Every structure is written in structure tokens, then in C-alpha cells.
Amino acid sequence: MSTLTRAGLAESIYAAVGLSRNESAELLESVLDRMKSALAEGDSLKISGFGTFSVRQKGRRIGRNPKTGKEVPILPRRVLIFRPSQILREAVDHGEAPDRPKSAASGA
């Protein structure tokens, strides 16, 4: 099993769209920056057929140090939540890539 990286995504954009490698990398960075900005502002991010990213506020609570057993306060924080779409869940469950829409540039 391999890991999908930024370089791998940029290479896929290069192969599929026909931009230069530098332009593909810049496009990817632009999209990722926009996604980060939206999430940092507290907006949800929905990618159809993939899933939804959202930010949730967690309140202050008491936790326990597992080593010592001592109670420790856990400060309030914002956490990132990902909810996969049903299409992605089914694809993962069956071990296959979900169908991708064919682009007009591919001639289909």
C-alpha cells in the first residue's frame, strides 16, 4: 500500500490536464490553501462523492493521565472532522476506486 503525496497529486494533475509540472504544483497548492482557509474560518468543505470536512468546537473537560491516574483539565479546542460520502464508503468497503466523471477534455 502506498501513500498519496502532494507530488503524486501534482503529477496526476500534470498527466490529466496537460499543464506544466510547475503549473500543476501551483494549482494544487492553490486548491489546498483555499481549503485550509475555509476550514480555518470555520466553514464546512464538501467535496461531492468524497466527503465533508468541518470544524467542531470541543469544550473544556477533565481527562486522566493514563500513566499516573491523575485528573488533568483538557482545554477547549477546535477539531477537524471528516465524514466520508456514501460513495467513498462503498468504494473503500469493496476495495475499489469510485467511478470518476469523464472530463470533456478526454473526449468522452
Image (tube, rainbow, N blue to C red):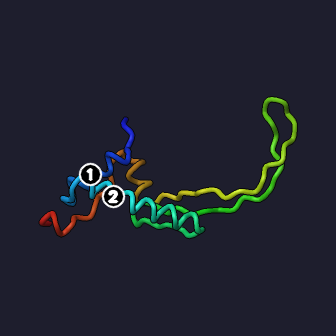
Please name the residue shown 21% across and 66% down the image. Answer: 103
In the picture as drawn, the residue positioned furthest to the right comes out as 70
Mark 2 falls on what kind of element?
helix
Q: Residues at badges 2 and 1 in contact (C-beta under 8 Å)?
A: no
Please name the residue shown 79% across and 29% down the image. Answer: 67
Q: What is the C-alpha distance between the residues marked 2 and 1?
A: 13 Å
Residue 62: where, in percent of width, then height? 83, 48
At label 1, the amino acid type is Ser
Please name the residue shown 29% across and 58% down the image. Answer: 99
Residue 43: where, in percent of width, then height? 56, 70
Please name the residue shown 21% across and 56% down the image. Answer: 20
Image-quadrant location for residue 5: top left
Which residue is more in the foreground, 11 or 100?
A: 11
Residue 65: where, in percent of width, then height? 80, 36
Q: Which residue is mark 1?
A: 12
Instruction: Give the number of the mark in front: 2 or 1.
Output: 2
Bin the neighbour count of mark 2 within 10 Å (Cα to Cα): few under 14, some 14-19, many 20 and up. few
Q: Which residue is mark 2?
A: 26
The image quadrant where one finds the C terminus is bottom left
71 displayed left or right of 91? right
In the picture as drawn, the residue positioned furthest to the left comes out as 107
Residue 81: where, in percent of width, then height? 58, 57
56 displayed left or right of 71? left
Which residue is more in the foreground, 99 or 47?
A: 47
At label 2, the amino acid type is Glu
